[in-house]
Image (tube, rainbow, N blue to C red):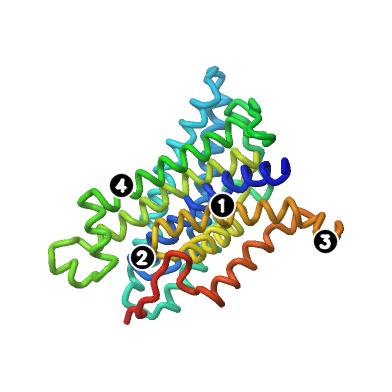
């Protein structure tokens, strides 16, 4: 039971991160019908940008508390990722908005590879250690150990998700985003600036990616140029699981995928007699993706709708 509870806690933390990244996928898909496969690399850029700021602050000789350094690192990563998201939409996707979907998909993969190589040139191939900036005080809860960092990740992710839901459903920008997602042509005729709405969608999604990037780097203690690839695939799986294009579905899919992956990593060894270890946990994400695509392509909360022309 202790193993189950511990893995459940780990899964919730991991699922919160997946949900944040999945929201970036689902927002773009909901408006453009485009899978932005470069989104995982935006997460990576956010983590490395935050790490650069953290290293500069720690090497400046000014004694600052760890949480403040982490907050300043995030404040540096946010505008970097937001500007990157805007540039990706403006330079790579907007010219292809009327092109066949395959062209946009290939472009997204190309942008992903481009960002990986750019990050490798700037930060190198090596793994970078991310300093422990938050207290590591353990707390025991029903036999499971929970750290301050895990509590902070889940609380911050929940607050951001709640804020995003409020933005989409209770603000003028949110109404414009929902109108654009439903019918861009009619929304444009009603006075909605479609280009601005789409650009802001990319900017908001990239801001979520920056937060997720520093969460991942702080949680695992490392950051590197290739960290966004697998994370992006898993977040895409979470978005598909919940129902891509559905904000609540992305959150649910992220949490479910995180729990499934953590429980699988905890029990795969005993269940296979030690033949498979916890390092096979990535398998579960892709098994889930295959099962969803076969049995429920629209996702848990998605609706079967006609494909856009």
Asked whether the residues under the numbered discs 2 and 4 touch, taking CB atoms below 8 Å apart as contact, a structural biologist would say no
Pick the front one: 273 or 212: 273
- Tell me the quarter of the image containing the C terminus: bottom left
**Residue 272 badge:** 3
Q: Nearer the viewer, mark 4 or mark 1?
A: 4
- Chain-order first, disc 4 or disc 1: 1
Q: Determine whether the residue tagged by mark 4 lies in a helix, strand or loop.
A: helix
Q: Which residue is mark 4?
A: 166
In screen coordinates, is 301 left or right of 61? left
Q: Nearer the viewer, mark 2 or mark 1?
A: 2
Badge 3 local density, few (<14 within 10 Å), some, or many (20+)?
few
Q: Which residue is mark 1?
A: 119
- Chain-order first, disc 2 or disc 1: 2
- Tell me the quarter of the image containing the N terminus: top right
* Residue in the picture at 66% in, 51% down: 262
In screen coordinates, is 214 left or right of 283? left
Asked whether the residues under the numbered discs 3 and 4 touch, taking CB atoms below 8 Å apart as contact, a structural biologist would say no
**Residue 231 badge:** none
- Whole-number angstrom distance, CA of label 3 to CA of label 2: 40 Å
Residue 114 visible within the image = no
Pick the front one: 205 or 283: 283
- Chain-order first, disc 3 or disc 1: 1
Residue 279 visible within the image = yes
Relative image position of residue 258 (x, y in whole percent): 59, 53
Relative image position of residue 6 (x, y in whole percent): 68, 41
Badge 4 local density, few (<14 within 10 Å), some, or many (20+)?
few
Q: How many marks?
A: 4
- Chain-order first, disc 2 or disc 4: 2
- Whole-number angstrom distance, CA of label 4 to CA of label 1: 34 Å
Identify whether 112 is placed above or below 97: above
Relative image position of residue 71 (x, y in whole percent): 47, 31
Residue 56 picture quarter: top right
């Amino acid at each position: 039971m202790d193993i189950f509870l511990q893995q459940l806690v780990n899964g919730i933390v991991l699922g919160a991160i997946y949900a944040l990244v999945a929201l970036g996928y689902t927002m773009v898909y909901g408006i453009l019908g485009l899978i932005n496969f470069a989104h995982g690399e935006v997460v990576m850029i956010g983590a490395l940008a935050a790490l650069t700021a953290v290293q500069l602050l720690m090497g400046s000789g000014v004694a600052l508390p760890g949480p403040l350094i982490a907050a300043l690192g995030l404040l540096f990563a946010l505008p970097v990722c937001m500007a990157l998201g805007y540039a990706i939409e403006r330079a790579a996707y907007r010219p292809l908005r009327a092109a066949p979907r395959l062209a946009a998909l290939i472009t997204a993969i190309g942008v992903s590879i481009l960002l990986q190589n750019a990050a490798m040139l700037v930060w190198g191939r090596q793994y970078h250690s991310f300093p422990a900036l938050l207290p590591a005080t353990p707390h025991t809860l029903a036999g499971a150990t929970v750290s301050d960092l895990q509590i902070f990740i889940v609380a911050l992710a929940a607050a951001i998700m709640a804020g995003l839901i409020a933005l989409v459903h209770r603000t003028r920008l949110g109404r414009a985003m929902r109108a654009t997602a439903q019918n861009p042509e009619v929304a444009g005729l009603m006075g909605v600036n479609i280009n601005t709405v789409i650009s802001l969608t990319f900017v908001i999604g990239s801001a979520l990616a920056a937060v997720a990037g520093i969460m991942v780097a702080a949680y695992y203690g490392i950051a590197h140029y290739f960290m966004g690839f697998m994370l992006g695939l898993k977040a895409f799986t979470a978005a598909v699981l919940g129902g891509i294009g559905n904000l609540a579905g992305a959150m649910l899919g992220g949490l479910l995928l995180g729990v499934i992956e953590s429980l699988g990593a905890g029990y795969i060894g005993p269940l296979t007699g030690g033949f498979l270890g916890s390092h096979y946990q990535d398998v579960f994400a892709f098994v889930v993706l295959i099962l969803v695509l076969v049995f429920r392509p629209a996702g848990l909360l998605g609706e079967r709708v006609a494909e856009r022309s």
